Amino acid sequence: MKRNKKRLASILLTMVMAMTLFFAAPMTVFAAPPAISNLTLFIVEADNVTIEFDLDIQANIFNVILPSAAPVPNETDIITGSVLNTVWAVNNPDVAAATGLINMASGLTPNTNYVWYMVAEDSANPGDITSVMSVPFRTLNDSASLISVAGQAITAVGIGNIASPMTASITVPNSTTSIDTPDIVAAQWALFEMNDDSAFTNAVAPFPLIVGVNHVYIGVLSEDGLTNLYYDITVIRQDVATTPTPTTPGTGSSANNVPQTNDINNTLGWTVVLAFVILGIFGLVAWRRRQSSQG
């Protein structure tokens, strides 16, 4: 009985010492990596884009923009700057935790599809990184070009304002009696409007065409709203086609009915010969009469 009590006391003492050593030793805390949330587009223009996001702890932010067709990069490549096909890349060190953080990229190509990739690394514990976050976007189109009207390509020249619009001319068949909105092709995503006055104030659709010369005034506004061009398109509608009346052989002014030079010369030659024959006959008759009177 005494031996069991000693053994139990020894076990309890050992447990107490182990617990004392455990709590006395410094504890290692494994921190969670930073968290990026609510990564969204804030402003998109023709050559720049601004994004917004939330960050839960202070961190280093690594950003890269790639064409949408490029492979998705991994965290290490983004942090080390070894991503292929990079269009734009920026690192933001020691960004404080906050909501509604803003980041902007510039120098992009208008009307192009991209993807913005982002990774965060804990400033206090390098190596603690988030997974790759991303947001796709397309830059706006800054073109206000007029591509075609009534299926015909437009090559316009000029300044392009209301006082001096860009000009071009096309010809359409008589069967084209009007030009409607679907007959006009402008730059992708651009807005346009047809007018029947040079002040570009009286919008019409469809635009009726008379036979002969028509002036269709078209204003085009680019998708980004920063480029506005005005066009004065001369549309010539052809008259009704007429079928030539066939000429009767031997009449009219056909080339086949025009006397040829050789025919004229032959006719004159025979006329001269006939005249000489007639004169010869008259001369012979006169000579025989003279002989008869002398006899």
Image: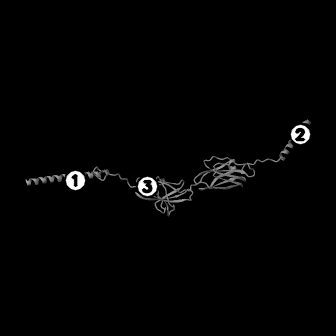
Please give the name of the residue rendered at 19% of the width and 53% of the height, measured from the top-left corner: 276
Amino acid under label 2? Answer: Ser
Residue 54 can be seen, yes or no: yes
Return the residue at label 3: 171
> Counting other residues with Cα less than 10 Å from the Cα at mark 1, is it few (<14), some (14-19), or many (20 or more)?
few
Return the residue at label 2: 10
C-alpha distance separating marks 2 and 3: 111 Å
In this view, which residue lies farthest toward the front? 295
Q: Earlier in the sequence, mark 1 or mark 2?
A: 2
C-alpha distance separating marks 1 and 3: 59 Å
Secondary structure under badge 1? helix
User: In the figure, is residue 193 to the left or right of 88?
Assistant: left
Amino acid under label 1? Answer: Val
Question: Horizontal and vertical percent for residue 51?
Answer: 64, 54
User: In the figure, is residue 191 to the left or right of 133?
Assistant: left
Please give the name of the residue rendered at 22% of the width and 53% of the height, measured from the top-left corner: 272
Relative to 217, say whether 10 is above or below: above
Instruction: Point out which mark residue 272 bears.
Output: 1
Amino acid under label 3? Answer: Thr
